[in-house]
Image (cartoon, rainbow, N blue to C red):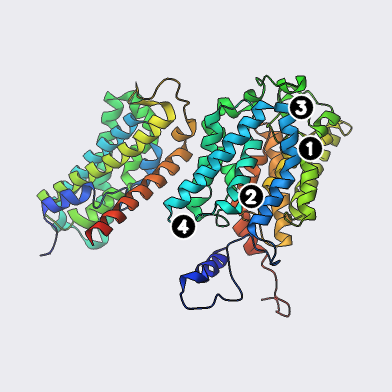
């Protein structure tokens, strides 16, 4: 990572040096893309398209509550991006849509009942402290949306914790009870798998439908906007650990499917962990990243006080990303092992 | 030793231009640990002030007897003496506060701010200068602790020194009184101080 940073600094913005032609090989902060048609804006629009099934399901299930969370988070994210970028004296970066993506992901990861200031504060902290202070898009160490969510999760445990999900006066009956993972953890109650997959359950507004997340996620992978290695390795790891627990407890597969389709796992695996700026660069590194995230998710789900661990798992693995990058530097062709 | 700062310069330097926390980044352990409320922060600041001034005076008095290779040991023993005094006084007269601060009062012994002042000033200059230096640095330390504690306590609980300053509908940002809040507040305030400094530097040019 340090090497990458040095390269970035030395080759930063060719327009700084007047009278010189911009170099053919331009080194820029990640996301690194070799396809010249692909730019950050196209990637971000892809992510928004990929998120649309989850957005539609959330709007259908939670109606006004979902709309409120999405609008609050997007508006606050854009405002925070504008404000913090201005403060750093840098050119304006709203056009690449990255702040919008952060806002949408943050909105989708909120409980429907959260008051407006929770989403707004999460956006400001996520964009400001999570992203711009580290140097803006591509330079951040931690996923901005998850930094913001972790901040409000700890700041407003009452409004963001398991209890917050139970008092939504949702318009669909199924969404007023405890979330599936809370019910499993604290009451030992399983939710049926079909509603979990379709999303007719309670939860953060964007995570409820595993089906919608898989649909959007496959689109991202088809467009090569997200790598397949990260979601695949996360899901396989979670499935393996859940299967072991399942067999050990004699649940006959219910436990396994429940852990796969409940909570933020699908949403996190496809949309949060795949953030190119905060995940490793190489295919091997992405696998390590995914396995680590999957293990941490299951450790937190099974052994900690929290019913769901996607957010903390992704944040912890974000911190490991520079190390994983250093481990998995690819051998240039023809070079012998040192 | 001709160009050593005078007592007045030492005193003024310690408060803002060479603020121990914001300029020298010394003594960050208590800065992070006890600033979740104004009361523990002020108690810590007063304890540090007492230890710092006393240690500076004593070191300055014995500075001609110090052997170079033993000076750190002597500093530490002197500081430890006064820390023990402060710790016992707190335990005797402010038992609850002493419980709240826990190990952080004994930890003043290894507070690098005090060792630094003994090394930089007290072991080289006369008693008056050393005392003024200790007092100035202690005031600077207290100001830094108070500023961080004010931000954290107001945002975290809506109160300051136990009085409500924000309306009762204020949603407490619990994270601000927890350890992450200390790091975030210190970082942001440091940035603010550097920003103001830059502005003043530019204005002077």
As measured in the structure, the alpha-carbon distance from the residue carrying label 1 to the one carrying label 4 is 39 Å
* Discs 2 and 1 carry the same chain letter: yes
Does residue A43 appear to the left or right of A261 in the view shown? Answer: left
Instruction: Tell me how far mark 1 sits from mark 3, CA to CA.
Output: 11 Å
Which quarter of the rendered picture does the N terminus of chain A lie within? bottom right
| Nearer-N-terminus badge (2/1) | 1
Earlier residue among tags 4 and 2? 4
Residue positioned 69% across, 27% down in the render: A63
The numbered dot on residue B91 is none
**How busy is the neighbourhood of tag 4: few (under 14 within 10 Å), some, or many (20 plus)?**
few
From the viewer's perspective, tell me whether residue A139 is left or right of residue A280: left
Residue picked out by circle 2: A317
| Residues at marks 2 and 3 touching, judged by CB atoms closer than 8 Å | no
Mark 3 neighbour class, 10 Å CA radius: few under 14, some 14 to 19, many 20 or more: many
Q: Nearer the viewer, mark 4 or mark 2?
A: 4
Secondary structure found at label 3: loop
Residue annotated with mark 3: A201
Q: Chain of mark 1?
A: A
Task: Tell which subunit mark 3 falls on.
Answer: A
Task: Mark 2 vs mark 1: give the one in front.
Answer: 1
Ranked by sequence position, the earlier of labels 4 and 3 is: 4
Contact between marks 4 and 2 (CB within 8 A): the answer is no
The CA span between labels 4 and 3 is 44 Å
Chain of the residue where label 2 is placed in the rendered structure: A
A93 or A190, which is in the foreground?
A: A93
Distance between mark 2 and mark 3 Cα atoms: 28 Å
The residue located at (75%, 33%) in the rendering is A57
Residue labelled with disc 1: A210
Query: Is residue A246 at all visible to an observer of this figure?
Result: yes
Numbered circles on residues, count: 4
């Amino acid at each position: 990572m340090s090497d990458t940073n040095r390269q970035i600094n030395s080759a930063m913005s060719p327009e700084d040096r007047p009278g010189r032609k911009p170099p053919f090989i331009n080194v820029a902060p990640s996301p690194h893309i070799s396809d010249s048609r692909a730019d950050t804006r196209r990637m971000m629009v892809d992510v928004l398209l990929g998120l649309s099934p989850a957005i539609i399901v959330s709007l259908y299930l939670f109606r006004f509550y979902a709309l409120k969370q999405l609008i609050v988070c997007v508006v606050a994210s854009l405002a925070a991006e504008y404000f913090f970028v201005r403060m750093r004296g840098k050119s304006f970066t709203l056009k690449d849509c990255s702040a919008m993506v952060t806002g949408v992901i943050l909105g989708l990861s909120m409980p429907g009942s959260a008051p407006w200031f929770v989403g707004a504060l999460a956006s400001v902290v996520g964009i400001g402290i999570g992203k711009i202070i580290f140097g803006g898009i591509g330079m951040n160490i931690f996923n901005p949306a998850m930094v913001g969510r972790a901040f409000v999760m700890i700041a407003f445990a009452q409004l963001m914790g398991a209890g917050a999900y139970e008092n939504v006066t949702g318009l669909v009956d199924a969404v007023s009870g405890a979330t599936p993972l809370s019910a499993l953890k604290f009451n030992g109650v399983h939710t049926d798998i079909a509603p979990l997959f379709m999303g007719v359950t309670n939860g953060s507004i964007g995570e409820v439908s595993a089906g919608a997340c898989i649909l959007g996620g496959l689109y991202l992978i088809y467009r090569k906007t997200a790598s397949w290695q990260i979601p695949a390795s996360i899901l396989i790891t979670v499935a393996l650990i859940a299967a072991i627990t399942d067999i050990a407890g004699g649940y006959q597969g219910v436990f396994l499917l429940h852990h796969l389709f409940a909570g933020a796992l699908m949403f996190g695996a496809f949309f949060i962990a795949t953030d190119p700026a905060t995940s490793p660069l190489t295919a091997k590194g992405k696998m390590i990243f995914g396995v680590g995230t999957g293990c941490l998710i299951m450790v937190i789900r099974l052994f900690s006080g929290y019913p769901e661990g996607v957010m903390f798992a992704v944040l912890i693995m974000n911190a490991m990303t520079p190390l994983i990058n250093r481990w998995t530097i690819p051998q240039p062709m023809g070079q012998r092992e040192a | 030793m001709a160009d050593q700062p005078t007592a007045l310069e030492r005193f003024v330097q310690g408060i803002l231009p060479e603020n121990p926390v914001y300029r020298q980044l010394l003594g960050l352990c208590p800065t992070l640990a006890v600033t979740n409320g104004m009361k523990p922060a002020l108690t810590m600041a007063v304890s540090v002030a007492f230890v710092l001034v006393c240690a500076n005076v004593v070191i300055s008095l014995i500075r001609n007897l110090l052997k170079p290779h033993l000076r750190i040991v002597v500093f530490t023993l002197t500081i430890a003496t006064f820390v023990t005094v402060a710790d016992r006084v707190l335990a005797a007269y402010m038992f609850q506060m002493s419980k709240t601060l826990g190990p952080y009062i004994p930890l003043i012994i290894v507070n690098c701010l005090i060792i630094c002042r003994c090394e930089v000033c007290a072991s080289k200059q006369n008693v008056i200068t050393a005392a003024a230096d200790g007092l100035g640095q202690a005031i600077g330390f207290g100001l830094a602790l108070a500023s961080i504690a004010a931000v954290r306590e107001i945002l975290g609980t809506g109160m300051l020194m136990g009085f409500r300053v924000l309306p009762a509908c204020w949603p407490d940002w619990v994270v601000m009184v927890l350890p992450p809040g200390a790091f975030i507040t210190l970082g942001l305030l440091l940035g603010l101080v550097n920003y103001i400094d830059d502005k003043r530097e530019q204005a002077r040019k």
